[in-house]
Amino acid sequence: MYKLKTINEFSSAHFLKDYDGDCKNLHGHNWQVETIVEAKKLNQIGIAIDFKQIRNTTEQVINKLDHTNLNDLEVFKDMNPTAENIAKYIYRQIGELINSENVKIKAITLWENNRCNVTYSET
């Protein structure tokens, strides 16, 4: 099994509903997204999946979040835009685009700063 990881970034604002602390106020993050995919085998030239394809797929998903107030997005109308929920959303969206017989998304690690992150996986 091969595991490949790429890193992308986006910026957005959010506030946490029903939270008793500073994060109940609108604030922003420069998020870092680590995307890990697994592949069972290599193609004829020895590549599992092109890193560029992983990065581009991740970029396609996070572009919908970039420079927005996450609370205003339809997906977060009924779901608090916590780091945990954002990571789950990104994971599932990338999975819909990238999963194949050979390649599957393994995990998303979402960093909200250089000290705090969450990893989401369904496997």
Image: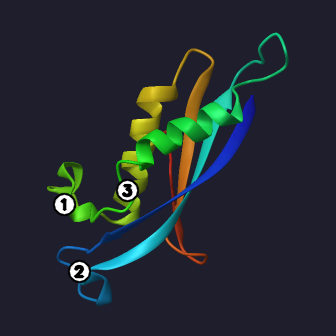
Regarding residue 111, the answer to whether it shows in the image is no
List x then y, in percent, for residue 3: 72, 37
Q: Amino acid at mark 3?
A: Ile
Q: Amino acid at mark 1?
A: Asp
> What residue is shown with label 3?
86
Q: Residues within 10 Å of mark 1 (few under 14, many from 20)?
A: few
Q: Earlier in the sequence, mark 1 or mark 2?
A: 2
**Residue in the image at 56% along x and 37% along y:** 56
Q: Amino acid at mark 2?
A: Tyr
- Horizontal placement of 78 versus 122: left or right? left
**Residue in the image at 41% along x and 48% along y:** 63
Q: Residue furthest front?
A: 67
> What residue is shown with label 1?
72
Q: CA distance from mark 1 to mark 2?
A: 17 Å
- Horizontal placement of 117 versus 93: left or right? right
Vertically, is 33 above or below 37?
Answer: below
Q: CA distance from mark 2 to mark 3?
A: 16 Å
List x then y, in percent, for residue 51: 70, 36
